[in-house]
Image: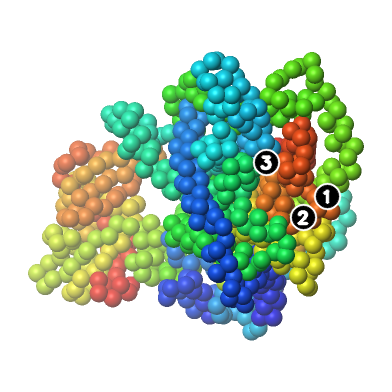
């Protein structure tokens, strides 16, 4: 079946820092695998190696059980049976929309012209752009262009579709719409896809599995739930948006959070030592001492700012020398900016690492 | 598949080799003559008037820079301040002189400013302020040679400086005035420093062009025996048996200077970027504009185009030229005679064929070179550098020097092309390669790699990608390259004179024959024919490349 196997892939661009470092990965047929990471983590390089637009230094790649790179084999891009959606659409400006979409069909078997047209229109109707066929790319909007680019990637029913940050040039509302559309197309068509993004929301919503990349290596791979629930390292936690970091220390005489005393009702048996806590903003509550009494961990903080963000309100809290963020659908905490509040959370909802080791406790 | 990669590498190296044969080989071949003939150095030193020719070359070059750089800069600055509605047209106007063949312009100027029969001189004398019966202006003097070549090269400076101004827009100047700087302070502290790269570059180019220039000193320096290196080389080349070894010695200063400029450019600007057209969005934020700004532009256009062209037209219509314009005597007899003359017909045909063949060969070669330079084509790094270096060698060597080297190389075995159109074409192709590269390269640079990548992913092989995506998207650049080559080939004078035999003239050479043996109206007719042929070429190129080719030339 059409999966992808990547084994011990290496790629270095000049200098000593590898863009991809001994990376191995298997992509299941019909899976949408999201490559997530900050710029420079190697996700785009990996995608380009898959497409053949970049030549790896070593390693092996197979697509749909066919070796495309490695072992003295290098299948050129145009024979890899791929589809690709580019960040800046890359619709050919001198061809009409339908000509753009039928382009891949020219090189896939000998289809009669009418058949090519018919399939191109079919693909366009999948992305609700069938009425745009005769226009030039410059005559349609950015969102439409990216839909057409999507149709172009789908039309040949390739073994693998590559998405290179396809939504990052669109505005917020379009991004949400198109993300949902890609999700539904993937569900109904069942293509195998590799999707590169630096947006963790996109990764969570689209990925069958998500791979977090760190300096050319796999930092963690798993379903979105697995990743969000138990990130394996501070790097992954941080990148998934679990970005409230609290330095917790257990001493014989008590607990310190960011150097300030904290009340811990349920210590979960943590031995003495220093820990890094990563807390999801939605797992942090604030209120009066009485209201917070039931939480496993409570500590005092100053309310630095209160940001009304529509559906939720964000509370920025000063905790010693760092700030943390709490998010809640409740907008009515009776505290003014600058006042002392009590912060409460459960230790079991936090991701806990030993400070020195950065390994999960 | 290492073998596949190597095969592609070999193709790129073949391109480098082709360029080396075209550009480098004739130069090496020429300079090698020097090594085998030890007496050449002595003969060159003894060449009569060599010292003054060297001095003249330098004076003419420096003078030209002093005229062209300030006036080109001023024009660019002023053109940016014309009313927005006009700006599109105005921006283009100062480049119109580049479309007139320099030979035609110089010929036109002599009818205006020659001491005895020049129209302007006659008008000045009629004011009664000047007593002599010639002058007061002597176009055959160094001063006026500097003026004429300065006016001609002003367009080049304008080209570079206005591109730099356009790209940057006026926001930075507005910012300076927002922070309280007055007009002069803004110019002094913001505009000028930011223009420095463009000014340095255009000063270098203009100096190089002025140093190697040929048309103006040949046509205007002749009567007073004002020789420069390039005219000396031409005299050597046209006195059989040609003393190539001595010519090789004379070429050394030009050669060294060209190498110096290439090295300087490389040092000042990175290696590929200088090919990129300096254009950007720009011009969105308005600056104060004024109709007055149109005056300098109109003035320049009048002096550099309208006057000489008008002079040519008038002279081509009179039975004989005395400096008096008598509309009643106008006749087309000169035109009839010229057009029915087999020599003229042949020269037009030869020029036409030479232009056609040159374009057909050099534009694809330029396309491949641009592809190699653009860096994402997979051309080996060294091959890329080779293409880059060779094209700038061709750019920095004066046409006279190249013409001399071509003459030597292609009359000798194994080529023996003297007297054929093929020789003219080979010479033109070698000369035009860099001009064919530049516009195509900048078109490729603006297009970006994703379009080709999308085609590859879509299943198109390298050739299909080039055909369906690469070519259509660089069409404008191809059109620009074609029109540029047409203009430059028709205008080409130095190489044309040297590589054509008396039996196979191109129009430029025909015009020079006319200045030596013909009458003023005959010269004017040939000059205007050159204008017509180059205009036809430009129109044809625009039809191929789309209307945008012209404004990007």
Q: Which residue is found at the position 56% from the left and 20% from the top?
A: B124
Please name whichever residue, B231 or B89, is drawn nearer the observer in this view of the structure: B231
Q: Farthest residue in the front direction?
A: B132
Q: Which residue is found at the position 48% from the left and 38% from the top?
A: B67
Tell me if mark 3 has few (under 14), some (14-19) or many (20+) residues whose alpha carbon lies within 10 angstroms of its own. Answer: many
Q: Which residue is mark 2?
A: B500
Separation of marks 3 and 1 at Cα, in angstroms: 18 Å
Left or right of residue B405, residue B178 in this image: left
Q: Name the spot of residue A301 as percent of width and height, x first.
A: 18, 50
What is the chain letter for disc 1?
B
What is the chain letter for disc 2?
B
Task: Work out whether disc 2 and disc 3 sit on a shared chain.
Answer: yes
Q: Which residue is mark 3?
A: B103
Q: Name the spot of residue B82 as percent of width and height, x first.
A: 51, 25
SS category of the residue bearing label 1:
helix
Please name whichever residue, B364 or A39, is drawn nearer the observer in this view of the structure: B364
Q: Name the spot of residue A235 as percent of width and height, x first.
A: 36, 66
Q: Is residue A290 above or below residue B89?
A: below
Tell me if mark 1 has few (under 14), some (14-19) or many (20+) residues whose alpha carbon lies within 10 angstroms of its own. Answer: some
Q: Name the spot of residue A287 as percent of width and height, x first.
A: 22, 46
Q: Which residue is found at the position 66% from the left and 66% from the top?
A: B243
Mark 3 vs mark 1: in front: 3
Separation of marks 2 and 1 at Cα, in angstroms: 10 Å
Q: Which residue is mark 1?
A: B350
Dividing the image into 4 quarters, which one contains the N terminus of chain B?
bottom right
SS category of the residue bearing label 2:
loop
Tell me if mark 2 has few (under 14), some (14-19) or many (20+) residues whose alpha carbon lies within 10 angstroms of its own. Answer: many
Name the quadrant containing residue B151: top right
Q: Which residue is found at the position 29% from the left and 57% from the top?
A: A244
């Amino acid at each position: 079946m059409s999966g992808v196997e990547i084994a011990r892939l290496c790629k270095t661009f000049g200098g000593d820092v590898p863009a991809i470092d001994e990376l191995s990965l298997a992509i299941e047929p019909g899976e949408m695998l999201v490559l997530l990471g900050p710029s420079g983590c190697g996700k785009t390089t990996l995608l380009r190696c898959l497409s053949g637009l970049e030549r790896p230094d070593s390693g092996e790649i197979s697509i749909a059980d066919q070796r495309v790179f490695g072992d003295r084999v290098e299948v050129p891009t145009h024979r890899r049976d791929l589809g690709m959606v580019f960040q800046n659409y890359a619709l050919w400006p001198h061809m009409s929309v339908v000509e753009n979409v039928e382009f891949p069909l020219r090189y896939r078997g000998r289809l009669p012209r009418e058949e090519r047209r018919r399939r191109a229109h079919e693909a366009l109707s999948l992305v609700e752009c069938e009425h745009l066929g005769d226009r030039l790319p410059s005559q349609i909007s950015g969102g439409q262009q990216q839909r057409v680019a999507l149709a172009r990637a789908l039309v040949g029913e390739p073994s693998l579709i590559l998405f290179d940050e396809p939504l990052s040039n669109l505005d917020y509302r379009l991004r949400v719409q198109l993300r949902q559309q890609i999700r539904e197309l993937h569900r109904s068509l069942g293509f195998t896809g590799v999707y590169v993004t630096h947006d963790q929301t996109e990764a969570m919503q689209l990925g069958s599995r998500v791979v977090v990349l760190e300096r050319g290596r796999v930092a963690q791979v798993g379903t979105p739930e697995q990743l969000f629930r138990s990130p394996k390292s501070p790097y992954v936690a941080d990148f998934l948006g679990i970005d409230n970091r609290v330095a917790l220390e257990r001493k014989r005489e008590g607990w310190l959070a960011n150097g300030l005393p904290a009340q811990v009702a349920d210590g979960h048996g943590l031995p003495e030592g220093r820990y890094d806590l990563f807390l999801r903003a939605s797992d942090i509550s604030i209120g009066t001492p009485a209201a917070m009494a039931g939480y496993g961990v409570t500590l005092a903080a100053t309310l630095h700012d209160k940001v009304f963000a529509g559906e939720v309100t964000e509370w920025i809290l000063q905790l010693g020398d760092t700030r943390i963020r709490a998010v809640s659908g409740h907008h009515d905490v009776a505290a003014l900016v600058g006042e002392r509040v009590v912060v409460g959370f459960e230790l079991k909802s936090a991701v806990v690492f030993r400070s020195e080791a950065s390994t999960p406790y | 598949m290492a073998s596949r990669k190597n095969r592609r590498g070999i193709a790129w190296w073949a391109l480098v080799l082709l360029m080396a044969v075209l550009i480098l080989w004739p130069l090496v071949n020429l300079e090698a003559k020097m090594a085998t003939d030890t007496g050449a150095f002595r003969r060159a030193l003894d060449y009569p008037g060599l010292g003054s020719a060297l001095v003249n070359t330098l004076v003419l070059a420096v003078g030209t820079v002093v005229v062209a750089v300030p006036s080109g800069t001023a024009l660019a600055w002023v053109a940016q301040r014309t009313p927005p509605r006009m700006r599109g047209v105005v921006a283009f106007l100062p480049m119109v002189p580049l479309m007139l063949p320099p030979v035609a312009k110089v010929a036109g100027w002599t009818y205006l400013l020659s001491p005895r029969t020049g129209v302007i001189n006659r008008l000045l004398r009629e004011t009664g302020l000047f007593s002599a019966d010639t002058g007061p202006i002597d176009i055959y003097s160094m001063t006026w040679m500097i003026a004429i070549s300065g006016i001609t090269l002003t367009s080049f400076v304008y080209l570079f400086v206005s591109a730099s101004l356009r790209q940057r827009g006026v926001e930075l100047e507005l910012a300076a005035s927002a922070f309280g700087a007055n007009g002069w302070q803004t110019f002094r502290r913001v505009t000028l420093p930011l223009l420095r790269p463009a000014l340095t570059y255009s000063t270098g180019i203009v100096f190089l062009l002025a140093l190697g220039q040929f048309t103006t000193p040949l046509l205007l320096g002749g009567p007073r025996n004002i020789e420069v290196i390039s005219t000396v080389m031409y005299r050597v080349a046209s006195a059989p048996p040609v003393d190539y070894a001595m010519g090789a010695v004379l070429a050394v200063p030009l050669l060294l200077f060209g190498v110096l400029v290439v090295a300087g450019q490389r040092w000042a600007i990175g290696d590929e970027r200088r090919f990129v057209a300096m254009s950007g969005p720009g011009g969105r934020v308005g600056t104060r504009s004024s109709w007055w700004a149109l005056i300098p532009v109109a003035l320049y256009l009048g002096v550099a185009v309208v006057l000489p062209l008008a002079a040519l037209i008038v002279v081509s219509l009179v039975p004989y030229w005395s400096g008096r314009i008598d509309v009643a005597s106008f006749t087309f007899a000169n035109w009839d005679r010229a057009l029915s003359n087999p020599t003229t017909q042949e020269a037009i045909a030869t020029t036409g064929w030479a232009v056609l063949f040159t374009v057909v060969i050099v534009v694809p070669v330029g396309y491949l070179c641009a592809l190699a330079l653009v860096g994402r084509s997979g051309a080996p790094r060294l091959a890329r550098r080779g293409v880059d270096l060779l094209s700038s060698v061709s750019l920095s060597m004066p046409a006279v020097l190249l013409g001399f080297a071509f003459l030597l190389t292609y009359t000798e075995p194994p080529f023996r092309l003297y007297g054929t159109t093929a020789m003219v074409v080979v010479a033109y192709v070698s000369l035009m390669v860099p001009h064919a590269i530049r516009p195509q390269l900048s078109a490729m640079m603006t297009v970006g790699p994703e379009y080709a990548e999308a085609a590859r992913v879509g299943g198109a092989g390298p050739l299909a990608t080039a055909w369906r995506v690469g070519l259509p998207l660089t069409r404008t650049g191809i059109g620009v390259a074609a029109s540029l080559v047409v203009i430059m080939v028709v205008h080409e004078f130095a190489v044309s004179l040297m590589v054509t035999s008396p039996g196979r003239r191109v129009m430029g050479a025909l015009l020079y024959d006319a200045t030596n043996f013909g009458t003023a109206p005959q010269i004017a007719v040939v000059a205007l024919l050159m204008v017509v042929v180059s205009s036809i070429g430009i129109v044809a190129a625009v039809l191929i490349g789309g209307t945008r080719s012209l404004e990007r030339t």
